[in-house]
């Protein structure tokens, strides 16, 4: 390799490092300080794109002003979403309360099963009777105490926290609704002015590609989660699980994360059922796991293709860093930041 080629390679390397460093810093600053303020208006923009065709239809069909049409459309949309969230949340909350109240029953069942296993281990290892059981019991009791001491008070006594969160959500919905109503009539003119700016010419190649990738990813995961939730709910109803809705939605949601997946819940559950001589339940759970994996393997390549271009290991790393920086919401912000960073680097390098 010649001296000039080596210098060119070093310059290119420095340029790539600089782009990655600046992009990473910019993404972090935006997520940390700007996103909480911009989020209501990002949601308003997305909803405005949905509401706008309805408002235009109402203007053409009933000669309603755009602002009135957008008001009717957004009120109907929020009423529909609110009704779904209310009835779904009510059912989920009821099942969650029931599950927590039944913890002592599950505790006794687990104790009975583990007692037999511990006795066998004592004989196999040559320990005195009850040695393994004592260690296991202490750890299980601590686990159940943590669940009962933390979850139950949170659900039953945190009334003020719930009221505060409800008020915050109400304020958020009100800001979004007002923004959508005022944005729809001027949507085209604002978009036209933005397209004429220098900012649009510079960042549009990046934002356009990012929007395409982000939309494809959200759409794909939403479809897969919905299909898997329906499959799981139907399967749990067949095995007569009293927490069918709660378990189905929870497992389907966790299945979207590469580090977790549905198998983390369904396989241990199937093993426990098999040890309890519930062969049909175990077979059903394994079948549900297979169906969920089949749905993901069939739909993900077809809907997402290679547009994301990120290996699972890097998604896991992004989730870990995201959680460390932003808390629970980092599960979503981490992979999103990785997609943004990859898009910026691919466009600039």
Image (cartoon, grey):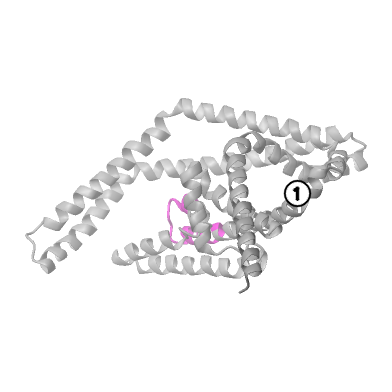
Residue 114 lies in magenta, yes or no?
no
- 49 left or right of 157 in image: right
- 186 left or right of 239 in image: right
Q: Specify the quadrant of the image occupied by residue 239.
A: bottom left
Judged by its main secondary structure, the magenta piece is: helix
Between residue 195 and residue 286, name the one nearer to us: 195
Q: Position of residue 101 (x, y in %)?
A: 35, 41
Residue occupying the point 6% across, 60% down: 128
Q: Specify the quadrant of the image occupied by residue 348.
A: bottom right
Mark 1 Cα shell of 10 Å, populated few (<14), some (14-19), many (≥20): few
Q: Position of residue 294 (x, y in %)?
A: 54, 70
Determine the residue located farthest toward the top in the rendered image: 160
Between residue 256 and residue 83, name the one nearer to us: 256
Res 255 seen here: no
Determine the residue located farthest toward the bottom in the rendered image: 1
Q: Position of residue 142 (x, y in %)?
A: 25, 44
Q: Position of residue 149 (x, y in %)?
A: 32, 36
Res 99 seen here: yes
Residue occupying the point 15% across, 57% down: 132
Residue 234 lies in magenta, yes or no?
yes
Instruction: Specify start and end residues of the magenta stretch as a single range.
Output: 229-247
Q: Quadrant of the C terminus?
A: bottom right
From the image, tell me which residue sits under label 1: 203
Residue occupying the point 38% across, 38% down: 151
């Amino acid at each position: 390799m010649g001296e000039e080629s080596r210098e060119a390679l070093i310059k290119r390397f420095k340029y790539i490092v600089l782009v990655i460093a600046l992009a990473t810093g910019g993404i972090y600053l935006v997520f940390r300080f700007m996103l909480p303020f911009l989020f209501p208006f990002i949601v308003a923009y997305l909803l405005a794109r949905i509401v706008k065709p309805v408002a235009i239809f109402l203007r053409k069909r009933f000669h309603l002003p755009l602002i009135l049409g957008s008001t009717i459309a957004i009120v109907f949309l929020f009423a529909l979403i609110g009704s779904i969230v209310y009835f779904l949340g009510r059912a989920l909350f009821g099942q969650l309360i029931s599950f927590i109240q039944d913890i002592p029953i599950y505790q006794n069942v687990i104790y009975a099963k583990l007692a037999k296993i511990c006795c066998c281990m004592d004989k196999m290892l040559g320990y005195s009777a009850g040695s393994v059981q004592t260690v296991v019991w202490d750890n299980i009791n601590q686990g159940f105490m943590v669940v009962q001491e933390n979850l139950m008070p949170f659900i039953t006594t945190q009334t003020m926290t719930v009221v505060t969160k409800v008020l915050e959500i109400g304020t958020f919905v009100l800001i979004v609704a007002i923004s959508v109503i005022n944005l729809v009539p001027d949507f085209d003119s604002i978009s036209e002015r933005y397209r004429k700016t220098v900012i649009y010419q510079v960042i549009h190649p990046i934002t356009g590609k990012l929007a395409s990738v982000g939309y494809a990813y959200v759409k794909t995961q939403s479809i897969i989660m919905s299909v898997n939730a329906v499959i799981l709910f139907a399967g749990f109803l067949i095995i007569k699980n009293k927490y069918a809705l709660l378990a189905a939605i929870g497992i389907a949601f966790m299945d979207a994360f590469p580090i977790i997946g549905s198998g983390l819940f369904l396989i241990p559950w199937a093993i426990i059922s098999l040890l309890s001589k519930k062969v049909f339940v175990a077979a059903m759970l394994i079948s549900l796991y297979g169906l969920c994996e089949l749905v993901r393997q069939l739909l993900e390549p077809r809907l997402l293709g290679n547009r994301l271009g990120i290996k699972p290991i890097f998604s896991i790393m992004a989730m870990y860093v995201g959680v460390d920086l932003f808390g629970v919401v980092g599960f979503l912000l981490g992979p999103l930041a990785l997609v943004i960073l990859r898009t910026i680097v691919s466009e600039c390098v």
